[in-house]
Amino acid sequence: MAVVKLSEEERLALLPTLTQWEYQSESDSIRKEYRFRSFPEALGFIVNLGVEAHSMNHHPELFNVYDRVEITWRTHDCQGLSRRDIDMAKLCDIIYAKYIN
Amino acid sequence: MAVVKLSEEERLALLPTLTQWEYQSESDSIRKEYRFRSFPEALGFIVNLGVEAHSMNHHPELFNVYDRVEITWRTHDCQGLSRRDIDMAKLCDIIYAKYIN
Amino acid sequence: MAVVKLSEEERLALLPTLTQWEYQSESDSIRKEYRFRSFPEALGFIVNLGVEAHSMNHHPELFNVYDRVEITWRTHDCQGLSRRDIDMAKLCDIIYAKYIN
Amino acid sequence: MAVVKLSEEERLALLPTLTQWEYQSESDSIRKEYRFRSFPEALGFIVNLGVEAHSMNHHPELFNVYDRVEITWRTHDCQGLSRRDIDMAKLCDIIYAKYIN
């Protein structure tokens, strides 16, 4: 089953279900920055997310410097935002929630 | 400065400052088992700990299967338990504390 | 489809296709030790293997201390060695082959 | 000892000792893109490098998507390129060399 791009209507309905993810219209993607207490903690998060993402065959764009990790979701197959990106964004927040307590 | 083995007196004073670490007299080491919600989470912990441990130049023995990680601390240079092992055990608990909330 | 244990005949045919994996009859499992140039390299291998293993939903028992990684394969569902363990052992060797050049 | 920015003369002497690192004048940094056979391999590299970098207390900017890793070196303390960045770039190439065989 081909992955399809969210329609504008779907996107406008789904984006408000996300917390602090920024929509980037020029690339039709969503982006969020996470902060950690240290680089080792940030790298632990990257690995935790990476293992999950690979088993779902949907990989993030990720940027890291020191205690900061930026994640961008966009679906290559449909050249834009799909339902899977919304789900992965929520998974990122679940994984991150452990670190902010 | 050479790393020295804890005397029995020091050991008996320090072990009670640890939470649920088991002393193994035959190898003069301490051991604890951690459980996680998933393998990706366990691997994130291993990486977080591994990065910290390497920068302190003191590496654990670690065993993992699925959501379970066993850590053993012992100091190769003194062939037994040193003060550094006690400190590393406490660091493990601090890193793990994030995951149990 | 349930995972089934290899028959003795199958096992005797398949084990010789592996390189330096040791059969452990008491646990009906196979085991190999890998050496690396450093702890960071060993941890990179653990992560590379871990990501692959999780996406195949078949996880190793792994033991690490410093530059040494021991991997044991056995299938929990059939309480012994299955065809999947043989495949995973070969995958380990492929991943490791990069590091010995 | 404070980390100091390379003078233009030093930079012009050192950059040719690097292989395929691109100098970015606007940020006074160097950048290289590495390709891998898979995401798990790319993540293994990120972890291997991350452990080394943390123990040297000099962290890269890293970007990853799927089998591609971009590394940028620049020294925060001197707001530009230092000798340490040149050394770290060489270390990246050494770590990567394992993967291209």
Image (spheres, coloured by chain):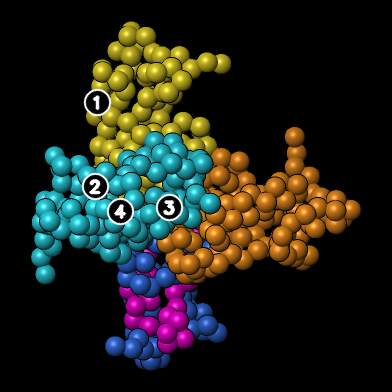
Chain colours: A cyan, B orange, C blue, D yellow
Q: Horizontal and vertical percent for residue A45?
A: 43, 51
Label 1 sits on a secondary structure element that is strand
Confirm whether residue D96 shows in the render.
Answer: no
Q: Say which residue label 2 marks.
A: A30
Confirm whether residue C55 shows in the render.
Answer: yes
Task: Quote the CA–CA distance across marks 3 and 4.
Answer: 14 Å
Question: Residue C83 magenta-drawn?
Answer: yes
Q: Which mark is residue D22?
A: 1
> In this rendering, which labeled residue sits more in front, label 2 or label 4?
4
Q: Say which residue label 4 marks.
A: A18
- When the figure is inspected, residue C39 is found, relative to residue C12, above or below; the finding is above
Residue at image x 61%, y 41%? B56
Label 2 sits on a secondary structure element that is strand
Residue at image x 11%, y 53%? A8
In the foreground, A81 or B69: A81
What is the magenta range?
A: C67-93
Indicate the quadrant containing the C terminus of chain B: top left, top right, bottom left or bottom right.
Answer: bottom right
The residue marked by circle 1 belongs to what chain? D
Q: Are marks 3 and 4 in contact (CB under 8 Å)?
A: no
Ranked by sequence position, the earlier of labels 3 and 4 is: 4
Q: Say which residue label 3 marks.
A: A96
Label 3 sits on a secondary structure element that is helix
Q: Which mark is residue B94?
A: none
Q: Quadrant of residue A7?
A: bottom left
Amino acid beneath label 4: Leu
- When the figure is inspected, residue B25 is found, relative to residue B5, above or below; the finding is below
Residue at image x 62%, y 46%? B58
Amino acid beneath label 2: Ile
